[in-house]
Amino acid sequence: MNGGPLPSFRPLGRLPYAEVGYGVENIFKVARVDFLHRLTYRNSPGARTFG
């Protein structure tokens, strides 16, 4: 957008990427809450393990 370089991507390796997600839907018929946990590649630089 501002002409800067795009972030670089790198291959993950031979191990497949895996994450687990769960959530609660229809809280008071208004909202939904989701949680995600990364199971593999947790020690990658800048990797978030929970979201």
Image: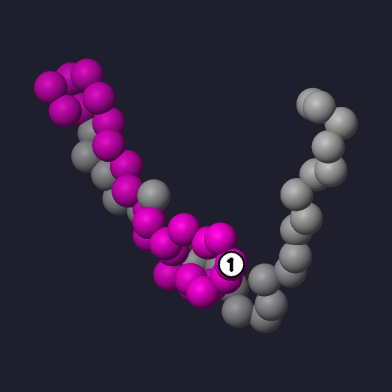
Name above or below for residue 23 compared with residue 3: below
Q: Image quadrant of residue 6?
A: top right
| Crowd rating for badge 1 (residues with CA inside 10 Å; few <14, some 14–19, many 20+) | few
Q: In the displayed image of the protein, which residue is found farthest to the bottom?
A: 14
- The residue pinned by badge 1 equals 45
Magenta residue span: 26-50
* Circle 1 SS class: loop
Name above or below for residue 5 compared with residue 11: above
- Number of disc labels: 1
Q: Position of residue 10 (x, y in %)?
A: 75, 65
Residue shown at the point (12%, 22%) measured from the top left = 28
- Asked whether, in this view, residue 48 is left or right of residue 3, the answer is left
Q: Position of residue 37 (x, y in %)?
A: 38, 60
Name above or below for residue 19 compared with residue 23: below
The color scheme shown is one colour
Residue 38 part of the magenta segment: yes
Residue shown at the point (27%, 31%) measured from the top left = 32
Quadrant holding the N terminus: top right
Residue shown at the point (20%, 27%) measured from the top left = 26
Q: Amino acid at mark 1?
A: Pro
- Asked whether, in this view, residue 41 is left or right of residue 3, the answer is left
- Asked whether, in this view, residue 34 is left or right of residue 24, the answer is right
Q: Main secondary structure of the magenta part?
A: loop
Q: Image quadrant of residue 31?
A: top left
- Asked whether, in this view, residue 16 is left or right of residue 29, the answer is right
Q: Nearer the viewer, residue 8 or 2?
A: 2
Residue shown at the point (22%, 39%) measured from the top left = 24
Q: Position of residue 11 (x, y in %)?
A: 74, 69
Q: In the displayed image of the protein, which residue is found farthest to the left?
A: 28
Q: Nearer the viewer, residue 8 or 25?
A: 8
Q: Position of residue 3 (x, y in %)?
A: 87, 31
